[in-house]
Amino acid sequence: MSKNKHSISKKSISDIEGIIVPVRWDEDGNPVAVALATSQEEELLINMKSAKARDLLKLLQKKVRIAGSITKLDNDQKMITIRRYLQIAYDQFVPHTSEAKISL
């Protein structure tokens, strides 16, 4: 029996910043899936099943902070399921506290 490449091996809750980048396109060249590219040169796939995740298709090449659960997939990639997100300016400082409003 083969392993599903998307089976869960580890889950954690995180608040992470990065730039939204496309990772999959339809036959017309429109992005249909995105990832978060972090300053540590890590790319976290975005779980595209929620409306919030699909909203990120409008924020390509924009900096965001995402709060959500991170799942490590069998292929060692990480996927984040969004709870909330906030678009931020490249030079904007947003404190990492529970008081920061990052929901839409």
Image (cartoon, grey):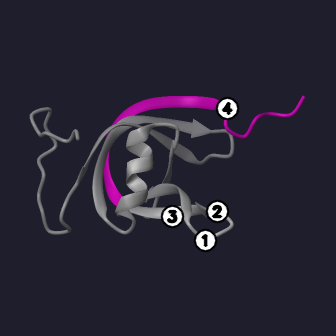
Between the residue at mark 1 and the residue at mark 2, the CA separation in whole angstroms equals 5 Å
Q: Secondary structure at mark 1?
A: loop
Marks 4/3: CA–CA distance: 22 Å
Label 2 to label 4: alpha-carbon separation: 24 Å
| Front in this rendered view, residue 3 or 28 | 28
Q: Which span of residues is magenta-colored? A: 1-19
| Residue ID for mark 2 | 26
Density class for disc 1 (Cα within 10 Å; few <14, some 14-19, many ≥20) is few
- Badge number at residue 13: none
- Is residue 65 visible to the viewer in this orientation of the structure? yes
In the rendered structure, which disc, 4 or 3, sits on the residue that comes first in sequence?
4
Residue for badge 1: 29
Nearer the observer, disc 2 or disc 4?
Answer: 2
- Amino acid residing under circle 1: Gly
Answer yes or no: is residue 38 visible: no
As helix, strand or loop, the secondary structure at mark 4 comes to loop
Using the numbered discs, state the Cα–Cα distance from disc 1 to disc 4 in whole angstroms.
28 Å
Task: State if disc 3 and disc 1 touch (CB < 8 Å).
Answer: no
**Who comes first in sequence, dot 1 or dot 3?**
3
Q: Are marks 3 and 2 in contact (CB under 8 Å)?
A: no
Sequence-wise, the earlier of marks 2 and 4 is 4
Q: Amino acid at mark 4?
A: Ser
Residue at mark 4: 7
Which quarter shows the C terminus? top left
N-term-proximal mark, 1 vs 4: 4
Q: Which residue is mark 3?
A: 22
2 and 4 marks in contact (CB < 8 Å): no
Left or right of 85 on screen, residue 60: right
Q: Secondary structure at mark 3?
A: strand
Question: Residue 82, how many percent across, how many down?
Answer: 39, 38
Looking at the picture, which amino acid does disc 3 mark? Pro
